[in-house]
Image (cartoon, rainbow, N blue to C red):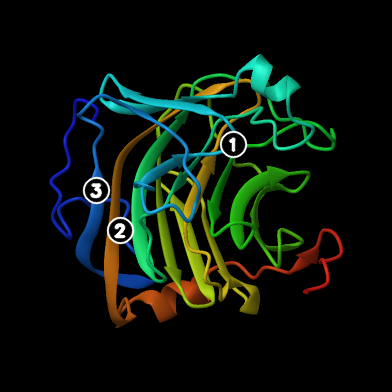
Amino acid sequence: MRPVLLALLPFAALAADLRPQLLIPDKVLFADDFSQPRELKAVAAKSPQVGAWNPNQGTRWTVADGVLKGEASTAEYQAAHDTHKGVHPRIVLTKTPADYVLKFSMRLIDGKPFVAGERKSVPPFVEIGHHIARVTWGENGAMLLADGDTLQLDVAKDFRLEPGKWHTVMVERRADEVFVQFQDGPSFYGKHPSYRSELHAVMLGGLEAGHMEVDDVTVWSIKEGDQPTWAAALKARPATKEVRLKEAKAKK
């Protein structure tokens, strides 16, 4: 909870310049302004004790100073793992139904700058369902991916997350559609069969060896239908071309 508070009402919590474009929000299902300090411990995904937040890959998370703070795993943890070392902060928001509107703010504090093309360079990301839909960075700039991160559906070549700056993000997810918008930044739209999945949790990731913060999280259920202006907004979007980045893995 940063100094400016947002009322947790279905529409009052939506910033005037960041409102749902595709879906119609209904009831608040979950909200967290991080006003109560606490440490977060990772538990098994299927555990009945799992809470709203589940740290990933041994990364360290705590609620302090009114925000959720994350950092990479310890050197000892990384030395003990061959893969999934937790070299950058990663956390899962588990309180997401199949269809929803999500709004939150995130800030990259520091970390190794992402360098496209370098095999071990780790980009930040917003992931909707594990390897289902992901906004991340690569050689083409900021991208919305599908089909197990192998297919680029939308792109914003010049967009970057500035370290030290809060970025407010809205995610709209329904069936085979995903719409993600960044306040004062670009938006990404994708419709793909691979988006139909039982995996709905949202994961946020920062930069390698860095720190990041999250604040003012709200999840809404949705009503039937689209926003009245969606058809016109979709038609006005620049045409995009799907780009196959690598071969998709064969489904078992």
Marks 2 and 1 close (CB-CB < 8 Å): no
Question: Of the residues tagged 1 and 3, which is closer to the observer?
Answer: 3
User: Disc number at residue 160?
Assistant: 1
Q: Can the viewer see residue 15 in this picture?
A: no
Look at 36% across and 66% down and name the residue there: 100
Residue at which label 2 appears: 19
Look at 47% across and 37% down and name the residue there: 42
Q: Looking at this rendering, what residue extends furthest in the top direction?
A: 75
Q: Could you say which quadrant of the image residue 21 lies in?
A: bottom left
Element under disc 2? loop
Q: Is residue 237 left or right of residue 10?
A: right
Q: Quadrant of the C terminus?
A: bottom right
Residue 96 position (above or below residue 137): below
Q: Amino acid at mark 2?
A: Arg
Q: Position of residue 187 (x, y in %)?
A: 50, 56
Cα–Cα span, label 3 and label 2: 17 Å
Residue at which label 3 appears: 31
Marks 1 and 3 close (CB-CB < 8 Å): no
Q: Is residue 102 left or right of residue 247?
A: left
Q: How crowded is the residue under tag 2: few (<14 C-alpha within 10 Å), some, or many (20+)?
A: some
Look at 69% across and 31% down and name the residue there: 85
Residue 68 position (above or below residue 216): above
Residue 175 position (above or below residue 94): below
* N-terminal-most mark, 2 or 1: 2
